[in-house]
Image: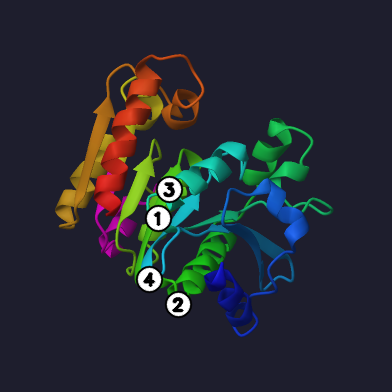
């Protein structure tokens, strides 16, 4: 794509961003995808997957925040599916180079090791990583300046947290994630928050009433759908299971997500 060639030139000029990865790594990405490296202030490298739609016009951008399984195949495939809807999609691998010798999620021995790495991440560093990603797409000439964030599970919680740190998001989509523990931080949110929850996800759903109350007190938009019979992680589960509550929740929420983002 001509757009990607222009992007590689621009990449070299952005502070904190290193050169994109070479073609040998594109086999792990969806079509039109490429890996981009960001240099963190601690010296390590954050890796992110960027996927472009087939379009010559500037489009909205969507940041994808993975669940506690890291930037796995499902997230990569979802990023490609979302890009096919006309969005520039960027999905940071937030545990990339967080453990010595392991560059990406796919380098970890198993999912238990991935979870361990994710739960040792410092909140301040996560925010810094998301800032690097946000600033990157904000300066991308293929983006029209409108940037939303979508997170799943652990990533849904991180998306909610980030909304309290960045007032410039167009919208925030929280899939079965919780609000920040300090509900007073919700006063800083300027973006509409949309939640997607499964009715069988009691742990997460138990936090909704207090979140709804606090958001209302601060005059912030917070609306949500709860899908009957669906459990936690119904998006990844629903994309793989035989037809049932998780699959139905996946299909309904996918349509709602695209409508909201557009």
Write the start and end of the magenta stretch as one range.
181-194
Q: Tell me the element at label 1.
A: strand
Q: Nearer the viewer, mark 2 or mark 1?
A: 2
Q: Is residue 261 visible?
A: yes
Residue positioned 40% across, 57% down in the render: 87
Q: Is residue 69 visible?
A: no
Q: Callout 2: 10 Å neighbours few (<14), some, many (20+)? A: some
Query: Distance from label 2 to label 1 (Cα)?
Result: 19 Å
Q: Is residue 86 left or right of residue 65?
A: left
Residue positioned 18% across, 57% down in the render: 218
Q: Earlier in the sequence, mark 2 or mark 3?
A: 3
Q: Earlier in the sequence, mark 4 or mark 2?
A: 4
Q: Nearer the viewer, mark 3 or mark 1?
A: 3
Query: Distance from label 2 to label 3 (Cα)?
Result: 19 Å
- Residue situated furthest bottom in the rendering: 13
Q: Tell me the element at label 3.
A: helix
Q: Tell me the element at label 4.
A: loop
The residue tagged 2 is 141
> Does the CB distance between marks 4 and 2 fall below 8 Å?
yes
Q: Callout 4: 10 Å neighbours few (<14), some, many (20+)? A: some
Query: Distance from label 3 to label 4 (Cα)?
Result: 16 Å
- Locate the C terminus and report the quarter of the image it occupies: bottom left
Query: Distance from label 1 to label 4 (Cα)?
Result: 18 Å
Q: Which mark is residue 58?
A: 4
Q: Position of residue 159 (x, y in %)?
A: 42, 52
Q: Nearer the viewer, mark 1 or mark 4?
A: 4
> Does the CB distance between marks 2 and 3 fall below 8 Å?
no
The residue tagged 1 is 149
The vertical placement of 14 against 209, above or below, is below
Q: Which mark is residue 82?
A: 3
């Amino acid at each position: 794509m001509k757009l990607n060639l222009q992007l590689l030139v621009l990449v070299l000029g952005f502070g904190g961003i290193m050169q994109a990865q070479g073609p040998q790594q594109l086999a792990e990405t969806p079509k039109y995808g490429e890996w981009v490296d960001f240099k963190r202030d601690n010296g390590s490298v954050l890796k992110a997957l960027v996927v472009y739609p087939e379009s010559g016009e500037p489009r909205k951008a969507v940041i994808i925040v993975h669940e506690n399984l890291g930037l796995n195949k499902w997230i990569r495939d979802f990023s490609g599916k979302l890009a096919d809807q006309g969005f520039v999609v960027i999905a940071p691998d937030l545990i990339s180079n967080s453990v010595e010798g392991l560059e990406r999620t796919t380098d970890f021995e198993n999912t238990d090791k991935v979870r361990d790495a994710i739960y040792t991440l410092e909140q301040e560093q996560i925010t810094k990583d998301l800032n690097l990603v946000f600033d990157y797409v904000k300066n991308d000439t293929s983006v029209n300046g409108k940037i939303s964030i979508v997170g799943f599970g652990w990533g849904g919680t991180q998306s909610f947290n980030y909304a309290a740190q960045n007032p410039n998001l167009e919208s925030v989509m929280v899939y079965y994630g919780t609000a920040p523990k300090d509900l007073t931080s919700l006063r800083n949110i300027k973006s509409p928050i949309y939640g997607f929850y499964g009715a069988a996800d009691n742990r997460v759903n138990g936090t909704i009433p207090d979140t709804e109350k606090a958001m209302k007190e601060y005059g912030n938009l917070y609306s949500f759908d709860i899908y009957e019979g669906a459990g936690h992680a119904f998006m990844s589960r629903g994309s793989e299971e035989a037809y049932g509550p998780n699959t139905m929740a996946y299909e309904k929420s996918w349509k709602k997500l695209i409508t909201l983002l557009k």
